[in-house]
Each structure stands twice: as structure tokens, then as C-alpha cells.
Image (cartoon, grey):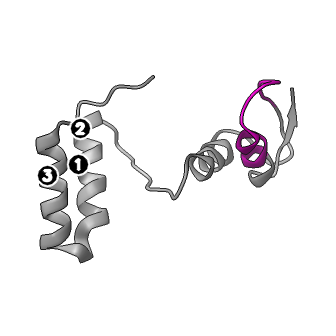
Amino acid sequence: PVVTPGSARDIGAAAFALIAAPERSSELLCTTLRETYGRPVVALTDSATSALVLVLRRVAVPNSVVAIPGFGCIDVAAAVQGARMRAIP
């Protein structure tokens, strides 16, 4: 399990920012996430699978062999394939 430092007040502020400036909402969210978690780079994705593809592409070369758990979500294997790598359990 992961715990984030966000609160109900943070969610309310984010919702207000989205309503007040929808054209800047992604930029504001990235800035908030960078500041909250002390990270230099933040990437917004549509799913955890897409995020895993981005990470794999960043840390390994195409056609690499990646070890994955024998039991787990099929999306992990899909991410490996989407990153143009091969998986072994």
C-alpha cells in the first residue's frame, strides 16, 4: 500500500484550480506533484500500464529480457511487450 500526503483540502484546491483554469490544469497538477513529492520530473499517464511502459523504455533498451512475477496482473506483461521487450517469469 502507498500513502500520499494529500488531504481533503488538497483535493478541494485541485478541483477549484481545474474549474478556474481548465486550460492549465495539467500544468498545475504536474507542478503540485513535483513540489509535493520533491521530484524533478512528473509524467501524467492514462493508466499504470502506460506509466510502466514509459519507465521500462527509460531504463532498458529494446529487446531486453525483463523478469516479471509468475503471478500478477496481465497488464504487467502487456507493458513489457509495449516497451518492446521480452518477459520471463
Q: How much space separates mark 1 and mark 3, taking CA atoms?
A: 13 Å
Name the residue tied to disc 3. 12
Which image quarter is the C terminus in? top right
The amino acid type found where label 1 is placed reads Thr
Q: Is the C-beta separation of discs 3 and 2 under 8 Å? A: no
| Image point (62%, 45%), residue name | 58
Badge 2 crowding class, 10 Å Cα cut-off, few under 14, some 14 to 19, many 20 or more, is few
- Looking at the rendered structure, the secondary structure element under dot 3 is helix
Within the magenta stretch, is there residue 76?
Answer: yes
Identify whether 27 is placed above or below 61.
Answer: below
Residue 46 is marked as none
Badge 1 crowding class, 10 Å Cα cut-off, few under 14, some 14 to 19, many 20 or more, is some
- Relative image position of residue 46 (x, y in whole percent): 52, 58
- Relative image position of residue 43 (x, y in whole percent): 44, 53
Name the residue tied to disc 2. 36
Query: Which region shows up in magenta?
Result: 67-80
86 with respect to 6 (left or right): right
Choose the circle earlier in sequence order: 3 or 2: 3
The amino acid type found where label 2 is placed reads Thr
Q: Is the C-beta separation of discs 2 and 1 under 8 Å? A: yes
- Relative image position of residue 59 (x, y in whole percent): 65, 39
The amino acid type found where label 3 is placed reads Gly
Name the residue tied to disc 1. 32
